[in-house]
Image (tube, rainbow, N blue to C red):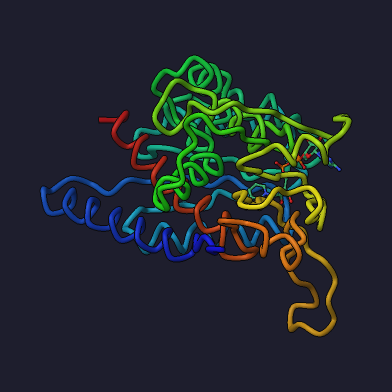
Amino acid sequence: MTILNGKQIAAEIRSELKTRIDALRSQGKRAPKLGIVIVGHNPASETYVTNKIKACSEVGIDAVKIAFEDTISEKELLEEVAKLNADTTIDGFIVQLPLPSHIDEQVITSAIDYRKDVDGLTPENVGRAAKGLPCIVSATPRGIRELLHRYQITTDGKHIVVIGRSNIVGKPMASLLMQKHAQGNATVTLCHSHTGHLKDICRTADIIIVAAGHPNLLTADMVRDGATVIDVGITRVEDKTTEKGYRLCGDVNFDEVAPKCAYITPVPGGVGPMTIVSLLQNTLQAYGYSK
Ligand code: NAD
């Protein structure tokens, strides 16, 4: 069994990105710039934003945090999105989710110019991904595809079960893997909370990608010997023995599933770092569009 070291692969990709961005600068070009919109004071969101800004600075991407109180209206936030769309100094931007309940996430994310949509959430990018056209791919699926690729785990001809149908992970992941492409060509089954016989379906999978936000959902009896398991889940579980008072829990019962696997990702240190580095790759891609 091999543990897929997302932390290490992400560090390698950051180093590659830094080399590319240093080269741009030495040619007298400006650095890529990412905007990060955050509304309110959700502690998990604050942590994600801090980590994203830190990752940007490590590779030489300028990052700007654009913070609003949670009293901002949907209309006002739409106006801010329009300003960012028009801002020629910003190559790409994200709106950190979740948003307060009085703001419709679909309305806001759909208003982003798709060339600046570095989270790959606009209907244009989702549609282009589904058609197999060039587009900005949502960061977590992009990171998972890259992690599989760098460990030479092929998807061609494999049966891949994706658990979870969110717009940010499950659906774009399934869409990518079914494409007629060297890093696709898989037979994909998309499972969700209304799926019957989840265990039986998972037992036929060569690769299982679980993004349900349900700690320990995937147990050993659901995994066939030699499978690859990718754990996207991140849930904060109270743990008074830790300094922070919580620990991060994946969707896989790692201790019992890992011995059956050929490859498995840990939580933390698996998919999470790959998601952040993919956002950096997407920003560089958007920088290319803005030239
Ligand atoms: P979500 O919370 O929007 O939706 C969860 C999905 O899982 C739904 O489609 C639901 O139908 C499905 N689901 C829930 N319980 C299930 C069950 N018992 N059986 C089958 N399907 C079930 O999903 P999300 O935003 O994709 O997040 C999923 C998890 O991944 C969360 O823990 C989130 O924190 C984490 N996440 C991690 C990263 C990362 O970089 N590692 C990125 C995004 C999300």
Q: Is residue 218 above or below residue 81?
A: below
Q: Write the residue at 59% across / 50% down.
A: 228
Quadrant (top left, top right, bottom left, bottom right) of the N terminus: bottom right
Quadrant (top left, top right, bottom left, bottom right) of the C terminus: top left
Locate residue 106 relative to residue 138 in the image: left or right.
right
For the residue pair 82 and 268, the one nearer the viewer reads as 268
For the residue pair 44 and 88, the one nearer the viewer reads as 44
Q: Is residue 86 above or below residue 52?
A: above
For the residue pair 126 and 37, the one nearer the viewer reads as 126
Image x and y of residue 221, in percent: 81, 52
> Quick one: which residue is furthest to the front in this view?
225
Ligand 1, seen in the image, is in the quarter at top right
Q: Write the residue at 52% across / 52% down.
A: 65
Numbered marks: total:
0
Q: Write the residue at 77% across / 34% down.
A: 201
Image x and y of residue 71, in percent: 77, 43
Image x and y of residue 276, in percent: 50, 53
Image x and y of residue 217, in percent: 82, 51
Q: Is residue 257 above or below residue 93?
A: below
Locate residue 82 relative to residue 109 in the image: left or right.
left
